[in-house]
Image: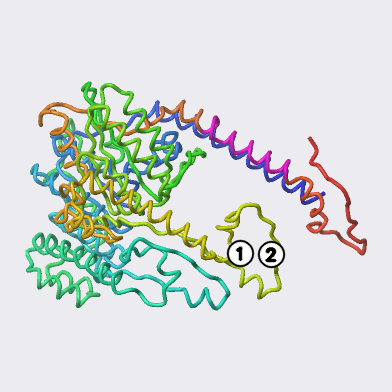
Amino acid sequence: MRFLRFLLWLFAAIGVLATGVFVAAVAALVWVQEHEPTLPDEIVLTLQLDGVLDEVRDPSVIPTLLPGQSRLSLFDIVRALDVAATDDRVSGVAVDLSQAVLDLAEAAELRSAIMRFRASGKSATAFTESFDDPAALANYYLATGFERIDLQPSGTFSALGITAAVPLVADLLEEHGIQAEFDRRHEYKGVMIGLTERELPDTVRGNLRTLITSQFESFVADAAAARNLSPQRLRELVDRAPLSAADALAQGLVDRLGYRDDWLDSQMPGDHEPAADKPAGTVELADYREVLDALDSGVRIAVIELAGSIARGEPDLPFGTRYRAVSGRLAEAIGQAREDTSVRGLILRIDSPGGDYIASDAMRDSVARFRNSGRSVVASMSGLAASAAYFVAVEADRILAHPGTVTGSIGVAGGKVSFGRALARHGIAVARESVGENAAMYAPTDRFDAHQRERHAAILDGIYQEFAGRVADRRGLGPDELDHVARGRVWSGSDALEVGLVDGLGGFHEAVRQVRELSGLTEGQPIELVVFPREPDRLEAVRSMLGKGGLLSVFARLDSVLRTAGPVLGLLGPLFEVRSGMSAVQPEIGPATLPE
């Protein structure tokens, strides 16, 4: 049948594509080995921030196969800048923020690295076409860490403040016969509230207001000081925004107006033509990082990320599990670090809104096992370390946050959405037979009955008590202190420090210092920062792409799906046939199988 033939051709095409990827990977490997980059004697580093940054590493194997195409992670950038600060060849850095997509914590991380770079006596300039996208406030916050900010003449200053919105769709769901039943612990827990409430509860509204006010005040204090403006004056300018580029220049928000090429031309190192025997030029930060010599000090600190929504399972594709933090991957990474006797401590980098409680408990146990091996753990929190993510963080010896980090949310919510009334409106009835009083408890067709609602509430109570109890134990909080910080409240990093949920403010650099202190390593003692799970070499990456969990696994699954779906596709195939003339489509009765 034509439909089935189409599927066979489709999967054949996928096979050809996979083969092409493999051949390209091998070719890239050979090319890279034959074309090692070299560096000039005098360097200005350049960096174009483009899109969302990974915290530590792109989880796929593709960047390993094609290193020239890899995206720098936040950790890569910070470490390269810290090395460059001590490299006599490097005289400055120039960063294009035009396409940057940052939150306030990521901006703070990069801003601190730029400030350390400048403290070594080197120059740092930033350019942007405009501060006018949703990340404008964070991008401008980063820009204030540079000694010079260039803005395109047609751009604007549109850093308009911070807003938090919660869509409330309960009426819409009710109109369509859909009912959301979610319970939460406790009154400040805002997750799923948009599905169940018609107005934002005062507790949640007040908590959100406190959070974004704290974030904004941290921005104002740092940015105003950097630009030699009073905090009040900067607030007034933000409230007046959007401002034209000319107005932004006149008000001292930026330093120069010009275009990107003009800005790049001004970055060439040196005040005169370089000597013939001493070449000079700009070098992309990615190329600079590529040729840095790996330090083999015999003393290592592991760096592991927990990024994305927390879920159970294992990474099962060669392209990674971006935006999901799966428990199996974290366990693998921590296991590798624990088995490496040269690893003296661990930096756990967290950027997660939370997620599955059972998965987070498995992650928490992995962190505790590493700590119980006699080595130190520092949790370094980026933009988000909320709910289940904070549950993992409490196992660390110390917890660090940025001033704008969304922290805490010590609480739990759960339930279901039922579509029974919506189905009934369309004449669809559900016939069910069950064995076990609560067999259909989480079925999406029926609401909880009284007994099921009681059992569900008991589960949530148990999770909350376990969560809050571990926080109280690890953070040394009494009952009253715990009640004040918990019940679902979210805190900024600055406020979390005041109430005892974190131990200090800072990013990767401060985390390294803390691990040194906890591990008894002196400030000047050489250490190697190693990302786990270990990045495969390029041959291993090819094997990973083709082997277990890779493309061969994908094809095996497709084959399994086709074998299972074959009889059904055989019956449905005639519906997809397109024939010319007047002949009828002939039905086929009985099982149909794909040819071997």
Residue nearest the viewer, comparing 543 with 385: 385
Q: Which residue is mark 2?
A: 430
**Residue 233 horizontal side relative to residue 407, left or right:** left
Q: Residue at x 39, y 35 (%)?
A: 331
Image position of 110 (left or right of 535) = left
Q: For the magenta stretch, what is the residue range?
A: 545-564
- The kind of residue on which mark 1 rests is Thr
Residue 157 appears in the figure:
no
Residue 346 image offset from top left, x and y in percent: 26, 34
Residue 445's tag is: 1
**Position above or below: 56 against 584:** above
- Residue at figure coordinates x 66%, y 72% from the top left: 424
Viewer-closest of 174 and 109: 174
Say if the magenta span includes residue 505: no
Instruction: Left or right? Give the position of 588 relative to 464.
Output: right
Residue 118 coordinates in the image, percent (x, y): 11, 47
